[in-house]
Image (tube, coloured by chain):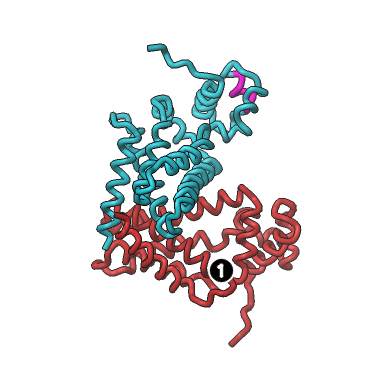
Chain colours: A red, B cyan
Amino acid sequence: MARWEPNARERLVLAALDLFAGQGYDNTTVAEIASRAGLTKTTFFRHFSDKREVLFAGQEVHSRLLADGVAAAPDSATPLEVVAAALDALTASFTAEHRERAPRLLAVIASNPELQERATFKRAALAAALISALAERGVPDLTASLAADLGARALDRAYDRWIEPSNQQELTELAREELQALRTAAMALG
Amino acid sequence: MARWEPNARERLVLAALDLFAGQGYDNTTVAEIASRAGLTKTTFFRHFSDKREVLFAGQEVHSRLLADGVAAAPDSATPLEVVAAALDALTASFTAEHRERAPRLLAVIASNPELQERATFKRAALAAALISALAERGVPDLTASLAADLGARALDRAYDRWIEPSNQQELTELAREELQALRTAAMALG
């Protein structure tokens, strides 16, 4: 099996994470990131609109993956089965490289309020994308919101477990487990 | 009944909303807000850390109100009953003045991505406060997250209905209705 070779985009992400972790997010310039990756500023801006977006690389496609997963679910699927299909589609895009760099990524985000706000906003955007996709299937608004909230929560919980060094499971499997656990808890709310 | 008289803090909020709506958020300075409210910049900064915070006035106490509501719920309350008590405590703090200014507030926030991120972050902070307060009562993590998500969603939905000009109900009543509807939907998820 060939060794994994990062492309320009990946190199920029890794260079940025190294610099952010080493000297701080605020103290790092786009020029430094590009230079460390062996690329130019022009190349940087072909891939990312600004320094902040390097940290959220790939997330712009997450909403689309969720929507694709929803669209692929059979007509007979319940709202939660549709959400499960969406999470399957999304979580399949998370690679071993994501997992490896996750602790540094989260540490950088935690160090800066602006980045925390951005991360929270991206999370809310995913939930909103899921609600829209469910509504398009004719799921009533209330149920769509509820199912999307369970999906977003399952994803959060699965991700937290996935990035623990001792965890050996796949993110897709963890997300399914968490969604199932939330479903059981929902029915037991009383 | 005495006419409602805004205090300095209220005057700053109203002046800021007028200016943001009239000339745009980015084009408005703290000096202009203070001047329009008949106050000084020094007074402004006694009440708010920056221009952005004027729009989120009062929200710093929301997490505390939620926590107070949770603490006041009887030991025998189910997690959702605890959430209902928290929403009661929070929604009681929303006045007719909040309702009147809500459309302008939302329009200003919608006009600026940075403000949208801030609003989303504040919403997430409320959900997190609810999870912590439930966890302190010994509610298991999974159930606490789920109940908090239902509470946050109920509050969003109730607020959207409350600010419709045709709506005559109180926010507290709307939040109870929405939480009950979400509870029913949760048990029917299948």
| In the image: residue A79, left or right of residue A54 | left
Residue where numbered disc 1 is placed: A163
For the point 71% across and 61% down, the residue is: A21
Residue A55 shows in this picture = yes
Residue B156 shows in this picture = no
Position above or below: B128 against A63: above
Q: Between A171 and B2, which is closer to the camera in this rendering?
A: B2
Q: Between B32 and A102, which is closer to the camera in this rendering?
A: A102
Position above or below: A49 against A84: above
Q: Position of residue B2 (x, y in %)?
A: 41, 12
Residue A51 location, quadrant: bottom right
Q: Main secondary structure of the magenta part?
A: helix
Specify the farthest residue to the top.
B2
Q: Between B18 and A35, which is closer to the camera in this rendering?
A: B18
| In the image: residue A136, left or right of residue A35 | left
* Circle 1: element type: loop
Q: Between A35 and B88, which is closer to the camera in this rendering?
A: B88
For the point 65% across and 64% down, the residue is: A104
| In the image: residue A25, left or right of residue A73 | right
Position above or below: B86 against A157: above
| In the image: residue A112, left or right of residue A85 | right
In magenta stretch: residue B171: no
Q: Chain of mark 1?
A: A
Q: Position of residue B81 (x, y in %)?
A: 34, 46
Q: Position of residue B38 (x, y in %)?
A: 59, 16
Quadrant containing the C terminus of chain B is: bottom left
- The residue segment tinted magenta is B30-35
Q: Position of residue B171 (x, y in %)?
A: 35, 34
Quadrant containing the N terminus of chain B is: top left
- Amino acid tagged 1: Ile
At label 1, counting other C-alpha atoms closer than 10 Å, the crowd grade (few under 14, some 14-19, many 20 or more) is some
In magenta stretch: residue B32: yes
